[in-house]
Image (tube, helix red, strand yellow):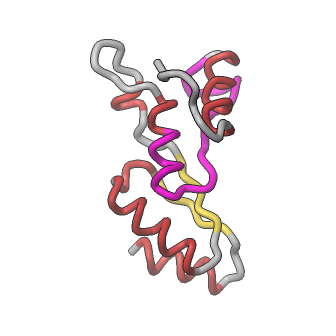
């Protein structure tokens, strides 16, 4: 279904397609490859990330997920806003964007 929807978007003249994090890492890499082959921008919505990012005892920081998704081939990530329903204060969200914009990490991320 993801490929059919992406093809439909391309036929309509779109230059970008959106996927959700919950589709899975293998599917994300596959659609990222399709996006490259079809000159499409790939946007990732973070739907579902809070199921593992908000757990304080065994969770995973969203910065790690951001880096994984960039390595998987995602072009653009919905990293949140400083106001609204998503988690985080302005400093936390700024940290997400800093992570996404960095070309390399000089330190281990939290």
Locate residue 76 relative to residue 3 in the image: left or right: right
83 vs 31, nearest the viewer: 31
Q: Position of residue 52 (x, y in %)?
A: 34, 30
Residue in the image at 37% along x and 56% along y = 23
Which segment did they paint magenta?
66-88
Q: Position of residue 87 (x, y in %)?
A: 55, 23
Does 77 appear in magenta? yes
Locate residue 69 relative to residue 59 in the image: left or right: right
Locate residue 28 relative to residue 97 in the image: left or right: left
- Magenta stretch: dominant secondary structure: loop
- On screen, 6 above or below 49? below
Does 19 appear in magenta? no
Residue in the image at 63% along x and 51% along y = 76
Residue at the bottom extreme? 11
- On screen, 90 above or below 67? above
- On screen, 14 above or below 63? below
Q: Position of residue 1 (x, y in %)?
A: 39, 75
Residue at the top extreme? 57
Q: Quadrant of residue 61?
A: top left
Q: Position of residue 74 (x, y in %)?
A: 54, 56
Residue in the image at 63% along x and 86% along y = 11
- On screen, 53 above or below 44? above
The tally of labels here is 0
Residue in the image at 55% along x and 72% along y = 35
Residue at the left extreme? 58
């Amino acid at each position: 279904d993801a490929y059919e929807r992406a093809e439909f978007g391309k036929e309509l003249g779109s230059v970008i397609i959106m996927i959700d994090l919950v589709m899975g890492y293998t599917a994300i890499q596959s659609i990222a490859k399709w996006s490259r082959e079809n000159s499409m921008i790939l946007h990732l919505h973070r739907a579902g990330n809070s199921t593992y990012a908000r757990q304080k005892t065994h969770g995973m920081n969203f910065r790690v997920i951001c880096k994984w998704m960039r390595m998987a081939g995602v072009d653009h990530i919905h990293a949140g806003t400083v106001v609204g329903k998503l988690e985080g204060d302005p400093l936390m969200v700024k940290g997400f964007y800093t992570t996404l914009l960095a070309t390399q990490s000089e330190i281990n991320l939290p």
